[in-house]
Image: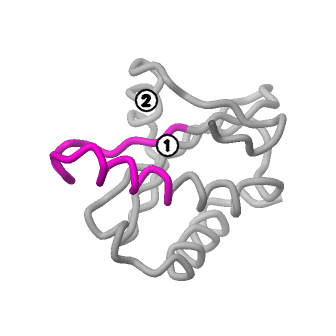
């Protein structure tokens, strides 16, 4: 299980994923898609990871993509994010082939552009 810090919890319910997807804040890059929903007056951040069967029919591949996304989130979102934000990271086919350093740059750039850094 992902242990970022006390400010983060994991999103597991489909209703929450759909609620966040209706928000207009998102960032698309070749390796992943990040959807964001800001919440006023709430301190805890939440994060969810998803990879659809359109990406790969094999669960092994989808799980590997999710592991890469978890590692990326753990490294970039740990202490650098403002409070009261829900994140959903969506894996793409190119997530497996993209260099990890390029994914880190994309994530940091995304956080700057969306004004989510502390």
Around disc 1, counting alpha carbons within 10 Å, would you say few (fewer than 14), some (14 to 19), or many (20 or more)?
Answer: many
Task: Kindly identify which numbered label has been placed on residue 29.
Answer: none
Look at the numbered discs 1 and 2 and tell me whether their residues touch, using CB distance below 8 Å: yes
Q: Return the residue at label 1.
A: 88
Quadrant of the rendering where the N terminus is positioned: top right
Residue at point 46% right, 19% down? Answer: 13
| Side of 20 where 117 appears, left or right | right
Q: Residue 23: x, y in percent?
A: 45, 37
**Of callouts 1 and 2, which one flags the residue occurring earlier in the amino acid sequence?**
2
Residue closest to the eye, 16 or 59: 59
Q: Choose top left, top right, bottom left or bottom right for residue 22.
A: top left
**Which element is circle 1 on?**
strand
Asked whether residue 53 is drawn in magenta, I would say yes
**Which contiguous range is marked in magenta?**
48-68
Residue 17 is marked as 2
Q: Position of residue 15 (x, y in %)?
A: 41, 18
Residue 56's spot in the image, x, y percent?
Answer: 19, 52
Image x and y of residue 25, in percent: 49, 48
């Amino acid at each position: 299980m992902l242990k970022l810090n006390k400010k983060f919890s994991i999103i597991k319910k489909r209703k929450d994923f759909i609620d966040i997807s209706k928000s207009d804040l998102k960032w698309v890059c070749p390796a992943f898609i990040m959807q964001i929903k800001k919440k006023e007056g709430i301190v805890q951040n939440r994060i969810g990871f998803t990879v659809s069967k359109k990406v790969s029919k094999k669960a092994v591949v989808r799980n590997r993509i999710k592991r890469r996304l978890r590692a990326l989130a753990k490294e970039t979102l740990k202490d650098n994010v403002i409070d009261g934000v829900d994140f959903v990271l969506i894996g793409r086919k190119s997530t497996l082939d993209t260099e990890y350093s390029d994914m880190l740059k994309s994530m940091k750039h995304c956080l700057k552009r969306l004004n989510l850094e502390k």
